[in-house]
Amino acid sequence: MADFWDIKNFVPIIIAWFIISYLILWVIGGACTSPINGSACLASGSLSVLSGVPIVGWFLPIDAWSSLMFFLAPVAGFILAYFAMKWWNDYFDSKEAYSIWFLVIAIIVLVFGYYINLSFYMGESASLNSRNGVKYSLSFCFSENNASDCYNNVQKVNQELVVQAQKNGAQTIPQYIPVAFWPELRRSMFISFMFGVIMAWIPFFVYGIYRRFSAKGE
C-alpha cells in the first residue's frame, strides 16, 4: 500500500485540511478580523468555559490573535511539523509519526522549549530589577491556571521573606517575580504555532488508523 504522501489526490487533501484547520484555529483565536491589533473578534471568549477543564484548561481558552504573528504562526507550525514527520518516517523507515505518542512527545518538547524561552526572557527582567538590598528571582506557577492566583501566592511568599530578612538583619532581601506559565503560554503566539503542529499531525494519525483497519480487512 502506498504511503500517506504517495496516495492519489494527496496534495488537494492536505491543502483542504490545512484550510479547514486554519479556520478552526482562527475561530479558537477569537475569529478576529483585524490582523494588526486583534480587534473585531467575532468569537472572543467563546471557549472560556474550558478554562476549568483539567489539562485542556492549560491550553484553552487562548487570548485573541492580537498581531499578524498570531496569524502566521500556525502556518509555520503546520508546514514545519509536516516535513518533520515526513522526514522522521522516511529516515527511520517507520510509521512512528502516525502514533499518538509522537504527538505527546512533540507537545512536551514544545512546552519545555517555551519554558526555556520564558526563563531567559523573564530572567533578564529579574536581573535588571535586582539592586542593592533586593535580589529578584523567578517563581514559576504551574498549578495555578490564572495569573491572579499566581501573583497572590507569590506575594505571600515575598512578604514572608521580607519579615524573615528584617528579623535576621539581612543586607539583601530575596524576592520572587511571579510567572504564571499557562496564562503566559495561552496569550503567546507560540500556542498558535503548537496548534499548527497538532493540526499537521492529525492527517497522519487518521491515515494510521485507516491503514490498521485496511490491514485487518485484507
Image: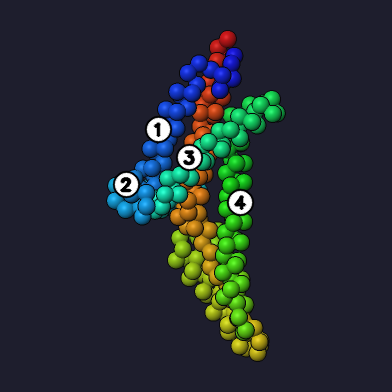
Of the two numbered discs 1 and 4 on the same chain, state the one appearing first in sequence.
1
Vertical arrangement, residue 24 with respect to residue 92, above or below: below
- Under mark 2, the amino acid is Thr
**Residue 141 x %, y %:** 55, 62
Query: Does residue 133 appear to the left or right of 12 in the view shown?
Result: right
Q: Nearer the viewer, mark 3 or mark 1?
A: 3
Tell me if mark 3 has few (under 14), some (14-19) or many (20+) residues whose alpha carbon lies within 10 angstroms of its own.
some
Query: Does residue 33 appear to the left or right of 203 in the view shown?
Result: left
Q: CA distance from mark 2 to mark 1?
A: 17 Å
Vertical arrangement, residue 77 with respect to residue 172, above or below: above
Q: CA distance from mark 3 to mark 2?
A: 17 Å
Residue 20 is tagged as 1
Name the residue that disc number 3 marks: 75
Indicate the colouring scheme: rainbow
Q: Extreme right residue here?
A: 92
- Under mark 1, the amino acid is Ile
The answer to which of 112 and 14 lies nearer the viewer is: 14
Say what secondary structure mark 4 lies in.
helix
